[in-house]
Amino acid sequence: MAAYTVTKVRKELSADRTHRHIEGVCTTAGMHYTRAQVVASIDAGNTWRTSADGYEATIAKITFCPVGACMATPYIKTNPDSTRKDNLENLDPC
Ligand SMILES: [Zn+2]
């Protein structure tokens, strides 16, 4: 099994154009992966973690984007209530 370290996220405008949510992530190796690719990899038993500014967290899958009634699926999170970079949503853009 492999371990991936995510340092940045890529966001996109939601389908209803009310917010920007995670489209995918970028790893230390400079590779970009979509949310679906990350979730498929987690399901296959691989480990995905974030590392940025001294904060680390484990990425988990969730069914939908947590904003309102957003239907973007699958979605990924770390510590969604954190205001620091242990929250996947707060990583720098890639
Ligand atoms: Zn959303």
Image (spheres, grey):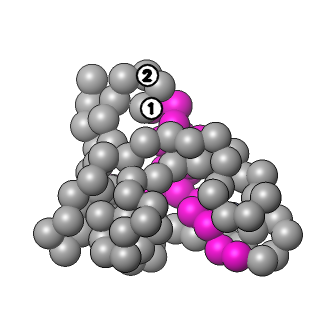
**In the image, which residues are magenta?**
19-41
The C terminus sits in image quarter: bottom left
The answer to whether residue 30 is visible is no
| Residue on which the image places disc 1 | 41
**Image coordinates for residue 67, horizontal then vertical, percent:** 67, 64
Left or right for 56, reference 16 = left
Q: What residue type is labelled 1?
A: Ser
Instruction: Choose between 81 and 56: the one closer to the eye.
Output: 81
Q: In which quadrant is the N terminus drawn?
A: top left
At 52% from the left edge and 68% from the top edge, which residue is drawn?
Answer: 10
Q: Which amino acid does label 2 sit on?
A: Ala
Callout 1: SS: helix
Residue 52 appears at what percent x and percent y?
23, 68
Judge left or right: residue 46 versus residue 32: left
Q: Are there few (<14), some (14-19), or many (20+) residues within 10 Å of tag 2?
A: few
Asked if 44 appears above or below 32 in the picture, the reply is above
- Which one is nearer the viewer's eye here, 29 or 25? 25
Quickly name the residue at label 2. 44
As helix, strand or loop, the secondary structure at mark 2 comes to loop
- Image quadrant in which you'd find residue 29: bottom left
